[in-house]
Amino acid sequence: MNRSNDDALVSRTISPNASSYNAILTAWSNCSDRKSATKALDLFRMMLERYNISCHARDALVRNKCQNELSSSKPRRDFTAKTDSFPDSRTLVALLKSIQILSSSMEFEDALNFVDSIREFATKVDDQNEWSHARDILPPTGKRKPDRIFNVFVCNAIIRTYSNLPATTLEEYRRCCERIDDLIEILESSHSVKPDVATRGMAIHAWEKSHRFAHECSDKEAKNCAKMRSAKVRVHADAILSHMQSTTSRRGLLFEKPLSIICDVIAMHGDAGETTEAEELYLRAREGNTSYVPILAA
């Protein structure tokens, strides 16, 4: 009789965790149709409904109560295992991939606000987790702090989504690019998350898309902003080259993609009439990377 009660108690603690949801989310996000992306979004909402962050403390109390109700003569069972279904960084990366698909049929402003809300959600979750962990009201996770949701993978996914939003005017392109730069600026001052080469490369790609749109535009004022755009991407190009030059033990094919991105920056300098800056960047990129001189020269 007691065993049946214990088994019933255990069965009530068995439920899908974040990994279970993430597997399905990833599968839906890998589909390129809007219907699948909508299902991914619905699943994310389900996760939030099932495990709201404000219920961390209550969840911990419920689990502790379950442990105390077990007979002390029987083996103690672990009710604090990783059974929570709250979204983690993998959840948001898959979700943002689906948002890119959905954004193609959304108004630009709605899509932009959607991505902004995901970014705000991630930062608030980390702030709440740190606050809760400091007061010992999160489910036990050992001595280490809970993993941050707002890590470099989520940041890069957010930047990639900003870059792929359905912008149709130069102003909309500019707003996406400025949000990316603002996010990178926050990362630079962060102690836990730093922008990597991929982060910088996607920022350059976003500005380069804006540059191409302006170049195709007949608006003279838009073309006159070329120097502003080249100055923006130059900051990221310098950071990429600094990283490449400091990583002396990792030369080779790893750097082919970053150097092709540097070529885009050189071209933008050229379009802005900044020949001196273009040559300076070319010489700096060529230094220590002679095997890629043809790529840079192109």
Image (cartoon, rainbow, N blue to C red):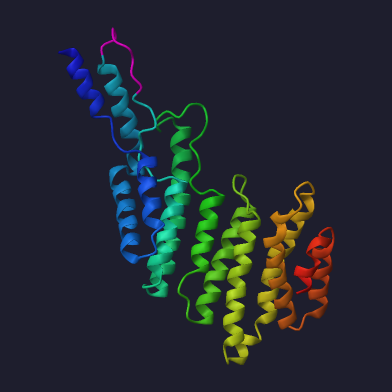
Residue at 63% x, 54% y: name it. 195
Q: In which quarter of the image is the N terminus?
A: top left
Residue at 52% x, 30% y: name it. 144
How far across and down, in percent of the image, does residue 176 sit? 52, 70
Quick check: 273 above or below 68? below
Magenta span: predominant SS is: loop
How far across and down, in percent of the image, does residue 209 sit? 58, 75
Residue lying farthest to the top in this orientation: 73
Quick check: 65 above or below 155? above
Using the rendered image of the protein, determine whether residue 234 is visible from the camera's viewpoint. yes
Quick check: 271 above or below 248? below
Along the viewing direction, whichever of 166 and 187 lies nearer the viewer: 166
Using the rendered image of the protein, determine whether residue 185 is visible from the camera's viewpoint. no
Q: In this view, does 246 lie to the left or right of 36?
A: right
Along the viewing direction, whichever of 1 and 107 lies nearer the viewer: 1
* Res 279 → quadrant: bottom right
How far across and down, in percent of the image, does residue 83 sit? 35, 33
* Res 183 → quadrant: bottom right
> Bounds of the magenta span?
71-78
**Is residue 195 located in the magenta-colored stretch of the structure?**
no
Quick check: 87 above or below 269? above
Residue lying farthest to the left in this orientation: 1
Number of labelled discs? 0
Residue at 25% x, 11% y: name it. 71
* Res 197 → quadrant: bottom right
Q: In which quarter of the image is the C terminus?
A: bottom right
How far across and down, in percent of the image, does residue 264 sit? 68, 72
